[in-house]
Amino acid sequence: MNIVACVKQVPDTEAQIKVKPDGSGIEEGGIKWVMNPYDEFGVEEALRLKEKNGGEVTIVTVGPARAMETIRTALAMGADKGIHICDPTFDGADAYATASALAAAIKGIPHDIIFCGQRAIDDDSGQVGAVLAEFLGIPQVTVITKLEFAGGAIKAIRPIEGAQLLIECPLPCLVTAQKGLNEPRYASLPGIMKAKKKPVDVKDAAALGVTVTANAKVAKFIPPPARAAGKIICGDDPAMKAAELARLLREEAKVI
Amino acid sequence: MAKGVWIVAEQRDGAFRKISFELAGTARKLADVLGEEVCAVLCGSGIEGIAGQLGKYGVDKVFVADSPALEPYTTDAHAVAVAKAVKENDPAILLLGASTQGKDLSARLVGKLATGLATDCTDVKIADGKLLAIRPMYAGKCFGEVVFSTFPQMASLRPNVFPAVENAKAGVVVKFDPALDAGQLKTKVLEVQKDTSGKADLTEANVIVSGGRGMKGPEGYAILEELAAVLGATVGASRAAVDAGWRPQSDQVGQTGKIVSPNLYIACGVSGAIQHLAGMSSSKIIVAINKDAEAPIFTKADYGIVDDLFKIVPEFTKECKKLLA
Ligand SMILES: Cc1cc2nc3c(=O)[nH]c(=O)nc-3n(C[C@H](O)[C@H](O)[C@H](O)COP(=O)(O)OP(=O)(O)OC[C@H]3O[C@@H](n4cnc5c(N)ncnc54)[C@H](O)[C@@H]3O)c2cc1C
Ligand SMILES: Nc1ncnc2c1ncn2[C@@H]1O[C@H](COP(=O)(O)O)[C@@H](O)[C@H]1O
């Protein structure tokens, strides 16, 4: 089975995000970079499929030189090889441009199933998987919490508002991973040593024949709106504090 | 020249989802600034009869694709149908819900229509005749103002953030043939397992009562369930509570859980870790009940009580019962 997992390097969830004074982006100094948490679920599921059915897992990423670390992390978890699409013209690329690059790279290799995260926790856009599936002309099942493969098709669970869907989809297809799908493994020490020798192909935009455009562009980054300081309800008696809270929610905030 | 503000209306089992009216109300506002029409696309099976309801919320025209292949929702069928209507009519703006369905469909349409999309927006406006979409990024640690260089300019709107304003327009129903061909329809919904609790999903709830590690165990949630019953609320949880197995994954609020924006969010025994705040800071009113005065949740809370939640919550439930009686 030929399995592809797309991974993105993103700031750690604990990172403080500061907007540059001119609003052109965020300050990258001091940020710890990690694999997007949803992509960890994708890589883990890719490895489990390979362990059960045989085959190969290829990791693909679009990102600057530092993103190589994230590919190595996935290789250390057990993936077989990597493709690193590295080109400064991809800085600030939107989902359309990123997916074009991923599609160009993936078209060149056999692919039965492709994993993406349900969203990247930096841009929070949740688009790249579906756009990539469209470019490859294959079906998608997004935001899944369970995956089974049998007889050339997958069955996946997709939670929606107030229900869970059981969806069947033939290969080749693309799925996006949600928390709950699995518990991602940690890279072992021997895994880390082996990862250093696994092949990673580095390509630029010209080699893939893609040009970067931004159909949707963040023209300005702004800090979040400040929240006015809240009211702490003081007192010694829990019943009185609870009553005061109920009164404020009814009379002042008008939400109950 | 691309013209008009379009929405993709969402229905399930022949009833509109609330987000459809939120989309319509917002589209109307934008269209009035531009002096253009609001149109909706509605896909499903046996839904022609409900289409006209959108007129009440400011929709001039509803393009309806009615086919058994469009129910239940699949990406394959809906993306083909919506893309066809959009290509034939060339709208300037296309709004969808940032619901599970809207997120799935809108992203696929980005590829099909070769355009750009701003996901999960909390504000949209017209600037210089074009769409300006404002959305949280980095889990709400900053916001981005998104502009577009292609048409349609697409945005998905966060549920529960935009008001569904009534503004009666014609709501003329126009049927169109989605031209689905069986070869395009690859995915099949084998089963729909409905949640029978009767509670609103967290992403659509007006009131959420959320419990964290401070609930001490699965039994602790009984007092939150009682409060929720009184307030008509849905119960949520922190990741710590979900990972401990006290609550199902579908209850988790936060960066790796659900993003919610109720009118009222009551956090009990939740410390307010940055990943939790990421999921709920667009709530309109936030209440924190926590015995640690230093807990970060208090920096986001509009109202706070520093005390043992097991003493406060039952009293608070009693008070609410009295007020709402
Ligand atoms: C990649 C990543 C993603 C994550 N995603 C999420 C996410 O989506 N959602 C999420 O919630 N977390 C997420 N987390 C976890 C997050 O960092 C915190 O660990 C988690 O939110 C803590 O949950 P908590 O507030 O319930 O527990 P704690 O931090 O342990 O807080 C418990 C609180 O309860 C209070 N308390 C205890 N007893 C009482 C009592 N009797 N009365 C009143 N108060 C009491 C304590 O004072 C404390 O403040 C993520 C972490 C990572 C690394
Ligand atoms: N630059 C990238 N390189 C590789 N994969 C990516 C990249 N950006 C996004 N993806 C994949 O698409 C998913 C959704 O990302 P996004 O649409 O940016 O939220 C991620 O979880 C990744 O699996």
Image (cartoon, rainbow, N blue to C red):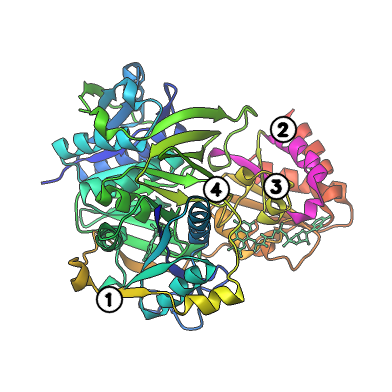
Residue located at (21% from left, 23% from top): B174
Q: Where the C terminus of chain B falls, by quadrant?
A: top right
SS at mark 2 in the image:
helix
Task: Name the residue carrying label 4.
Answer: B260
Subunit that carries the residue with mark 1: A
Front position among marks 1 and 2: 1
Residues packed near mark 4 inside 10 Å, few (<14), some (14 to 19) or many (20 plus): many
- Which residue is at the front of the view, A69 or B128? A69
Figure quadrant of residue A65: bottom left
The magenta segment is: B204-231
The answer to whether B282 appears left or right of B88 in the picture is: right
Q: Nearer the viewer's eye, disc 4 or disc 3?
A: 4
Look at mark 2 in the image and give the residue it sits on. Answer: B229
- Quarter of the rendered image showing ligand 2: bottom left
Q: Please count the marks in the image.
A: 4
Contact between marks 4 and 3 (CB within 8 A): the answer is no
